[in-house]
Amino acid sequence: MVDRPFYVTTPIYYISGNPHLGHAYTSIAADVLTRFHRTRGRAFFLTGTDEHGQKVAQAAAAAGLTPQAWTDGLVDKWKALCARYDVAYDDFIRTTEPRHTDAVVKVFEQLKERGDVYLGKYEGWYCTSDETFWLEAKLIDGRCPNPECRREVQWLSEDNWFFALSKYRARLLAYYKEHPNWVRPERAYNEMLVTIETGLEDLCISRVNLDWGVPLPGGGVMYVWLDALLNYITALGWASNDEKFRAFWPANVQLIGKEIARFHTIIWPAVLWALELPAPDLVFAHGWMTVDGDKMSKSKGNVIDPFEIADRFGSDAVRYFLMREVPFGADFSISEEKVRMRHNGDLGNDLGNLVKRSLAMLARYREGKVPSTSSSAIGPRFSDLGERVAAHLQTLNFRDALEAAWELVSALNRAIDETKPWELHKAGSDEALDAILYDLCEGIRWLALLLAPFMPNKSLEIWRQLGLAGEPSGDWRAELRWGGLAAGTITQPAADPLFPRIDAGPA
Ligand code: ME8
């Protein structure tokens, strides 16, 4: 069997402004998933920026810059967002790079040769915010029908290229029926299936009156959505590095927000088939983040600055909140209060105190040295925990994975309260004291491993406090065996709490 890396992608984000926390959400989820898969083999994580199109051109013009100067000036901010949240991508593609634009032209030529693109006239509406063509009948009150958008649309009458999407309708229907899990969550699958059943129109794939995009032979530029979708294969070296490309494609998981499901689960597979390539294994359309129930928007002034919230709570705590709050796929509302509750509760009271109390008792009763023991009250109850957390991560149930890990946090805290190590010490019950102290340290080691994909910094801190070398990134199947922590290990408890309490009010 070929050792195929696990290939994960995020959408490439429009570089029409600064990133907000919604963008970080998808990238963090992709990072958690990639880190998990790296514990079992190779993984490859692609993200990047969508730099062409009318929306970016307009933002640049408003700033008095050329689109290229505008995107060059902003891209570092998008990379900095990844760095701030420890989003460890393997490749970051910009759609203005020649490795992408060259390949995009090749795609166009191939599609043309195949007879899958043809010249026609587009007469209809266009939403610049969504970069979407809308036919008259689809508009709602004369505005963009996307519920997240509802902005004014612009009339277009252009001679453009069209992709013969309707030709792929039957294949799409068959594919959906044969692969009922290829679009998740189920709601997105059902919605997309209905869209296909209702009928598909051919897709306009060029903009003849726009010059900010990939120039097409004969004039005009490629429609920004087709340009953007292709990043997932151009970054791998499609048509330039066949060996790399074959080793990576099809992607294992493509993460997107639910509002762009139609592009990724109807247009994208059809384009891939037209290029004689397979569709990705899974497209996961996650839910939408709102602020106190409202859509995040500049005009409402409720955009959460991802840098500020990370400075206030720490990037790991924000990552934890985002993955723990709701099942991936569900919409959710974020507020400072909610993040603070999770931070002070789950992280500070449950996990942070567990580590602090356990290592403090070890320091007091055993000079910080992990004792040896022959019995464990806790290990046998959790022998399948690694497999359970892994199973949840395989299916992108981030919340369930964290809840399963928290069963161990709770069990260890409860064990302290029930065994009362201070009384065992007083009574001279050395064996029982060794047993509970070992269980606590070993349980904490497990937690560092299980939580590392979610909270890479805090897990490493825990690992260091346990006195362990390297990083908590080993293969769970080998590492998660109760008793793995060597007796005699000298722990290094830190004076400061892992998650110092944060009170309401200004930072
Ligand atoms: O659509 N809640 O880019 P974009 C959850 N360039 N996720 C959110 C979010 C929110 N409030 N806001 C943004 C584009 N996202 C195209 C994609 S891909 C070939 C081209 C995340 O800058 C989510 O992943 O509008 C969403 O799909 C994406 O950012 C949209 O980013």
Image: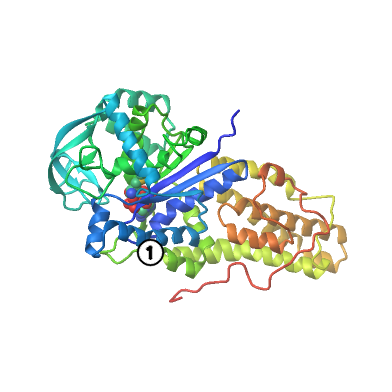
| Viewer-closest of 224 and 129 | 224
Q: Position of residue 271 (x, y in %)?
A: 33, 32
Point 58% across, 71% down: residue: 500
Q: Quadrant of residue 20?
A: bottom left
| Viewer-closest of 284 and 104 | 104
Point 66% across, 61% down: residue: 462
Q: Is residue 400 visible?
A: no
Q: Position of residue 305 (x, y in %)?
A: 39, 65
Q: Quadrant of residue 448?
A: bottom right
The residue beneath circle 1 is 304
Q: Position of residue 51 (x, y in %)?
A: 32, 52
Q: Is residue 468 above or below residue 274?
A: below
| Label 1 packing within 10 angstroms: few (<14), some (14-19), many (20+) | many
Q: Position of residue 424 (x, y in %)?
A: 82, 64
| Viewer-closest of 129 and 209 | 209
| Left-right relation of 374 to 55 | right
| Left-right relation of 337 to 409 | left
Q: Is residue 489 above or below residue 2?
A: below
Residue behind label 1 places its C-beta within 8 angstroms of ligand 1: no
Image quarter in which the N terminus is found: top right
Q: How is the image coloured?
A: rainbow
- Name the residue at the bottom extreme: 506
How many numbered discs, if any? 1
Q: Is residue 62 above or below residue 204?
A: below
| Left-right relation of 47 to 206 | right
Point 41% across, 31% down: residue: 279
Q: Is residue 444 above or below residue 204?
A: below
Q: Is residue 166 visible?
A: yes
Q: Is label 1 in a helix, a strand or a loop? A: loop
Residue type at mark 1? Ile
